[in-house]
Amino acid sequence: MTAAWTPVALARDLPRLCVMPVCVDGTQLALWRSATGRLAAWADRCPHRGMRLSHGFVRGEALSCIYHGWSYGSDGHCLRIPAHPDLVPPEAIRVPVFHAMESGGVVWVVTQATDALPPTVEGTPLRSLTVEAAVDWDAAGFSVSGPVARGQLSGMMVTILVQPLPQGRFALHALAEATASPSAQIEVSRGLEGLRRRAEEAFA
Ligand code: FES
């Protein structure tokens, strides 16, 4: 069985030197991008006292914890402990690291080893939004393959990448046709909000 890649964000929503929290397979992760643009997805828990690393800050190619400033290099290994500047941190102080990849303007993460690549998607990254209920893709006229749903919205073919979240919620990452004009993109964005409203009303 091949481990599945999960879409977690549109790439443009994670600029360099930024970190954000994401959830994959029920695991909270800190997703961040270094000064040179390298992506990383780590367990969202500092090995020191458990502070969320997604509250931390990126400097160069390292992510630092907001609490006591321990800083971690690209392989998750602790580089520096500010309270003990002369100490070389032991190898054992390490953040669990997962695979993150950018493809088609989308950031994908997988939490298990895999040789597979993320699904190929095309289009103009449009927006991400959270839905508090499951969308009935059949009723919406979409075809679904893995995390990829494709169908018409506001008269245009749209690709929606579905990311399961805890407590029955979902993040939807939408891509419009590559040729979509700015006004068409606005219409698709409104259509996406309508999709969300109908899903949440059906659930209420
Ligand atoms: S909890 Fe992260 S450095 Fe202390």
Image (cartoon, rainbow, N blue to C red):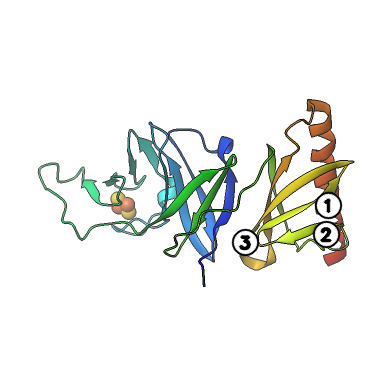
Residue 165's disc is 3
As helix, strand or loop, the secondary structure at mark 2 comes to helix
Q: Is residue 204 something one can see in this rendering? A: no
Residue at left offset 43%, top offset 54%:
99
Residue extending farthest to the top is 182
Q: Is residue 18 something one can see in this rendering? A: yes
Q: Please name whichever residue, 113 or 47, is drawn nearer the observer in this view of the structure.
A: 113
Residue 100 as seen in the image, left or right of residue 187 = left
The amino acid type of the residue labelled 3 equals Leu
Residue extending farthest to the bottom is 1
Q: Residues within 10 Å of mark 2 (few under 14, many from 20)?
A: some
CA gap between label 1 and label 2 equals 6 Å
The amino acid type of the residue labelled 2 equals Ala
Q: Name which quarter of the figure residue 141 lies in.
A: bottom right
Residue at left offset 18%, top offset 57%:
91
Residue 195's disc is 1
Q: Which residue is mark 2?
A: 199
Residue 38's disc is none
Would you place residue 178 above or below residue 49 in this image? Answer: above
Do residues under tags 1 and 2 come within 8 Å of each other at their CB atoms? Answer: yes
